[in-house]
Image (cartoon, rainbow, N blue to C red):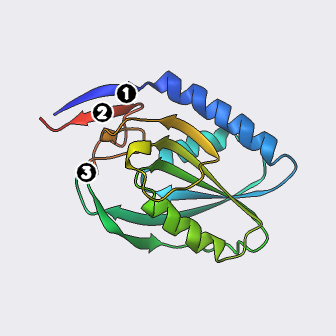
Amino acid sequence: MAVEIYISEDQLKNKITELAYKINEDFAGQELVVICVLNGAFMFCADLLREITLPVTMEFIKASSYISGTESSGTIKFEVDLKTNLAGKNVLIIEDIVDTGLTITKIMEKLKSHGPSKVKLASLLFKPSRNIHPVKIDYLGFEIQDKFVIGYGLDYDGRFRELPYVGIFDED
């Protein structure tokens, strides 16, 4: 198994600072409910929150379309649900990667049914070549090729989340 650095630690830090600036500007003077999509977005979420200067209520949701390995199962399973009332609130979803778009589409449908004022999406990564469920990414880190990536919260069978960069995973 080999890992090639795809997005460096410095590139991640610079992009997160840029995204946080836009979020702070767009929601100036307002409160945010930030919803971190577990497990993969936890590092991106933590680093982004350190740069956000707004009052934040933190929530977590867990929805998965990956059984194991590198392929999506095509169905969504919610394992952790929300406790905060979202009615009339500004919601920012923080996601690690938008691949086919199925998972985030289902999450957004679920959240919008709670009547928030706004729902915005921040995603660290986006694979346009795999996207079949179009979704608007309001704050995008990086558009990437159709490679299986790990690190910075992203995993392969539960491993490699701790890497401080995004790497391309090669099983060989």
Residue occupied by mark 1: 6
Task: Give the residue type at disc 1.
Answer: Tyr
**Cβ–Cβ under 8 Å for marks 1 and 2:** yes
- Determine the residue positioned at 58% across, 40% down: 140
Q: Who is closer to the viewer here, 160 or 75?
A: 75
Q: Is residue 112 left or right of residue 124?
A: right
Badge 3 crowding class, 10 Å Cα cut-off, few under 14, some 14 to 19, many 20 or more, is some
**Numbered tag placed on residue 70 in the rendering:** 3
Secondary structure of the residue carrying tag 1 is strand
Type of the residue with mark 3? Thr
Is 133 or 54 nearer to us in this picture?
133
Q: Earlier in the sequence, mark 3 or mark 1?
A: 1
- Quadrant hosting residue 21: top right
Q: How many marks?
A: 3
Task: Look at mark 2 in the image and give the residue it sits on.
Answer: 168
Kind of residue at badge 2: Ile
Q: 44 above or below 32?
A: above
Considering only order in the chain, which callout, 2 or 3, is on the residue closer to the N terminus?
3
